[in-house]
Image (spheres, rainbow, N blue to C red):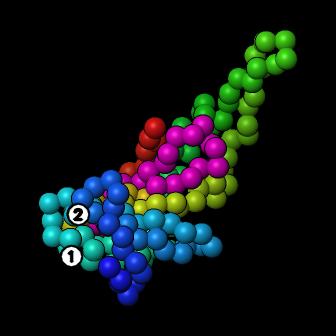
Amino acid sequence: MQHGILGVIEPSDAFQGDGVATIEYESREIQIHISPDGQPFETTLKLAVEVVKRLKELDKTAKRIIVADLRDCYNSGWNEYDQVQQDGTLKTVKNPQLSERDFGAKFSLVEVNVGGNRMIDFIYEDSGLFWGHSVIVTSLSGTDFSDAEAELFG
């Protein structure tokens, strides 16, 4: 299916009735997953289009949520790890704590999931801050991110 805003929407390989679009954002491609979750596809498609039209604003808001919800978590332990030395002993490595600005700059949006008529997930690459875990900002109120939360996954 061809769409004026989302481009080509392909059927999802994972779930029948879902669609996937790939768009250009900040010099990279990100996937937009459209999952009706019991709603008409057109309803979820409309929400996906709204997200893409407001992507820069919503990304900025989501990054503020990441900073508010996860920066203290990083600075109070995730910034430390043990490194195995040649003799088999462990040496603790402690990366510096990050300011709000520096922490927020570490995140790049890689995927958006839109479900039903209200659920939105923004999935971020975190420059290795959380050792391979995904960082996800979830809104259950559509593009109103006032109650959205960031969490680690994986």
Tell me the residue at 15%/70% (across/down).
Answer: 40
Label number found at residue 42: 1
Q: Which quarter of the image is occupied by the N terminus?
A: bottom left
Q: Is residue 76 left or right of residue 2?
A: right
User: Which contiguous range is marked in magenta?
Assistant: 123-148
**Picture quarter containing residue 106?**
bottom right
Tell me if residue 145 can be seen: no
Label number found at residue 17: 2
Name the N-terminal-most of marks 1 and 2: 2
Is 140 drawn above or below residue 75 in the view shown? below
What is the distance, in whole Å, between disc 1 and disc 2 at their CAs? 11 Å
Is 120 drawn above or below residue 92 in the view shown? below
The residue type indicated by label 2 comes to Gly
Near-viewer residue (100 or 29): 29
SS class of the residue under badge 1? helix
Q: Residues within 10 Å of mark 2 (few under 14, many from 20)?
A: some
Tell me the residue at 55%/73% (across/down).
Answer: 25
